[in-house]
């Protein structure tokens, strides 16, 4: 006979979200579960909305709003602040970005135009500025690399020319020394000759 266990008689929720390590405290766990539930609602809303109505969804209807989550749990909004719960705020930001991409792709599929919000435009400008600065830095690096390379080549050519000149001068001086040695030998021979 089998032992009695309550596990055999309770329903197990297969769709229960996995709670990350940073959301183990009771309040944060409740906030996390409420956010996950809201994300599911928003995803369903975006996917099930009529084609004409997708574009008309307001920002608060297609994003997770921290104050709405706090209000739904009847807690203070200050519990969802970056300085207190940075992982939770980061999670919200990442999920909002994903939801915006989902909404945008749904709008694109339906052929509906989209007008960017001020925040999106500012973010796009910041991104373009970063790309522009990176491109400027890259072109400056390439320019200075070429300048240094050409300067090195010029200095190498100058050194080669100077080396050739010095070799010629060295040969001339060797010949002069050899001539002087022969003259000295001749003079010594003349001095040593009896008169």
Image (spheres, rainbow, N blue to C red):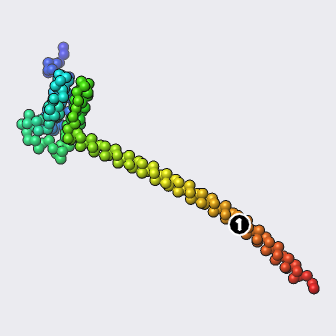
Q: Residue at x 56, y 55 (%)?
A: 153
Q: Nearer the viewer, residue 157 or 193?
A: 157
Quadrant of the snapshot with the C terminus: bottom right
Task: Say if residue 179 shows up in the picture.
Answer: yes
Task: Give the residue pinned by disc 1.
Answer: 170
Query: Is 6 drawn above or below residue 33 in the view shown?
Result: above
Q: Quadrant of residue 170?
A: bottom right
Q: Nearer the viewer, residue 116 or 6?
A: 116
**Residue 160 position within the rendered picture, expressed as x and y whole percent measured from the top left:** 63, 59
Residue sitting nearer the eye, 4 or 114: 114
In this rendering, the count of numbered labels is 1
Q: What is the quadrant of residue 107 in the picture?
A: top left
Q: Looking at the figure, which quarter contains the N terminus? A: top left
The image quadrant that residue 78 belongs to is top left
Most extreme residue toward the bottom is 195
| Residue occupying the far right of the picture | 195
Query: Hey, which residue is sitting farthest left in the picture?
Result: 74
Residue at image coords 16%, 18%: 8
Label 1 crowding class (10 Å Cα cut-off): few <14, some 14-19, many 20+? few
Residue 26 visible somewhere in the drawing: no
Q: Is 115 above or below relative to 146?
A: above
Q: Position of residue 126 (x, y in %)?
A: 28, 45
The residue shown at (20%, 43%) is 86
Q: Position of residue 173 (x, y in %)?
A: 73, 69
Furthest toward the top, the residue is 1
- The answer to whether 148 appears left or right of 156 in the picture is left
Asked whether, in this view, residue 174 is left or right of residue 27, the answer is right
> Which secondary structure lies at badge 1?
helix
Residue 61, image x, y percentages: 14, 31
Determine the residue positioned at 12% across, 35% down: 69
């Amino acid at each position: 006979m089998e032992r009695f266990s309550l596990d055999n008689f309770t329903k197990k929720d297969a769709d229960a979200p996995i709670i990350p390590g940073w959301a183990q405290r009771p309040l944060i766990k409740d906030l996390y579960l409420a956010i996950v539930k809201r994300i599911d609602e928003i995803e369903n809303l975006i996917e099930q909305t009529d084609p004409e109505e997708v574009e008309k969804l307001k920002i608060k209807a297609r994003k997770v709003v921290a104050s709405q989550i706090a209000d739904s749990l009847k807690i203070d909004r200050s519990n969802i602040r970056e300085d207190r719960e940075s992982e939770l705020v980061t999670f919200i930001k990442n999920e909002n970005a994903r939801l915006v991409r989902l909404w945008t792709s749904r709008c694109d599929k339906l052929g509906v135009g989209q007008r960017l919000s001020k925040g999106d435009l500012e973010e796009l400008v910041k991104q373009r500025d970063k790309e522009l600065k990176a491109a400027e830095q890259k072109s400056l690096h390439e320019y200075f690399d070429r300048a240094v390379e050409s300067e090195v080549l010029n200095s190498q050519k100058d050194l080669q020319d100077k080396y050739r000149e010095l070799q010629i001068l060295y040969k001339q001086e060797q010949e002069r020394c050899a001539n002087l040695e022969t003259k000295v030998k001749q003079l010594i021979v003349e001095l040593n000759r009896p008169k």
